[in-house]
Image (tube, grey):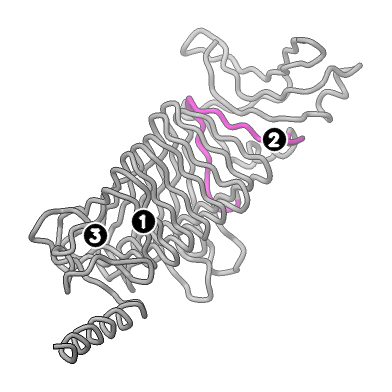
Amino acid sequence: MRRMSGVVILSAMAGLVMHASGTQILWDGGTDLLFSTAENWAGGVVPGASDEAKNRVGMADLIVIDSDRTIDKLTGGSRSGGGYKIETGTLTVKTTYADGNTARANCLTVIDGGTLNAQGVSKIGLGGDDDTGSSTVQLKSGAFNSAGTVTLGHESTGILEISGGTATFNSRLWLGGDGGTDTRNGNGVLTLSGDGALNVLSDDVVVGKRLGEGTFTMDDSASAVFLNLAIGDVSVAGQEGTGAMSLLGGTLNVTGELAVDNGSVLIDAGTLVWDGDHVSDFSALVAEGNISWSSGQSMLYDTWDASWVDGESILYAYQDAIETGGDTIIWATTIPEPTTLGFIAAAGLILIISRRII
């Protein structure tokens, strides 16, 4: 009896050692939709901190994350669809989060109340060569945090929709392409609406990265804060990306550099705040036709109205909006009160670009 018990114990330990090396565990389903149910996974093992969790080809159900989980990699999507739903707790992915990881894959990840914490890179719409797949991440409430580069549309189409909650990325955000040595022609789409918020404070946001196409739209009362923003990547000759940004509502704050190199910016009812002395920079972008307004309005440089409050001013440039019978604030700069108006134009500390009927 002792000998048989010893054999059983050793066999179990050997199985644990093999599993500890890290494996790809496929979703079978069939019991329920809970990530935590062992019977839903091949081999009856729930993926752990050293494992890769992957949707099984042909599964269209969203796997529900209903408690705190830590895994090494998370991949999802097949030609038949598939994905995840994070309702409660935190899902921590240690190395790679890949949404739609095979050619012509379609995947959906919904974050609604929980938190996705990606400690490595995040690739939404990873796909394959000449891909027609589309993968989407929807942040409705809760949080999406990423420590590594976030790519929307590596080779296929990658979509990030933020309608609530807060996304915080501590590295780069690329829409379209991957910026690596290989040429990619993905399509990245970023949409902020409702009261959703996005913060990218330590690196660049590129809309249209290297041969890719990027589209960024803000609406409603959404908010975003970016360190640097580039519309259209022109860093590699012959491999330029194209980008388009539409501010239909909400507020976008750029604290560093804003470049529109191969694309366009459309301002409707949204507000663009550009920290720093950028009066001449913004004027140049308008003059070059890179920034426009949906009503076909153009910026005026010589119509000013200054008001002073506690030693600071808001200096507005106006254009008459004949179709509405009112004035439209095209842009404004807030600065300390100078001694002459000549100093005003040179000393701007913050630039606010918006379209407001007053």
Q: Mark 1: which amino acid?
A: Gly
Residue underneath mark 2: 275
- Residue 196, by quadrant, is top left
Q: CA distance from mark 1 to mark 2?
A: 30 Å
Q: Mark 2: which amino acid?
A: Asp
- Residue 82, by quadrant, is bottom left
Q: Is residue 222 above or below residue 3?
A: above
159 left or right of 226 in image: left
Report the span colored magenta: 261-278
Q: Position of residue 260 (x, y in %)?
A: 60, 47
Residue underneath mark 1: 158
Q: Mark 3: which amino acid?
A: Asn
106 left or right of 127 in image: left
Q: CA distance from mark 3 to mark 1?
A: 10 Å
The crowding category of the residue bearing disc 3, from other C-alpha atoms within 10 Å (few below 14, some 14 to 19, many at least 20), is many
At 44% from the left and 64% from the top, the residue drawn is: 94
> Between 192 and 14, which is closer to the camera in this rendering?
14
Looking at the image, tell me whether mark 3 or mark 1 is earlier in sequence order: 3
Q: Are marks 3 and 1 in contact (CB under 8 Å)?
A: no
Could you say whether the residue bearing mark 1 is in a helix, strand or loop?
strand
At 57% from the left and 12% from the top, the residue drawn is: 327
Could you say whether the residue bearing mark 2 is in a helix, strand or loop?
strand
Looking at the image, tell me whether mark 1 or mark 2 is earlier in sequence order: 1
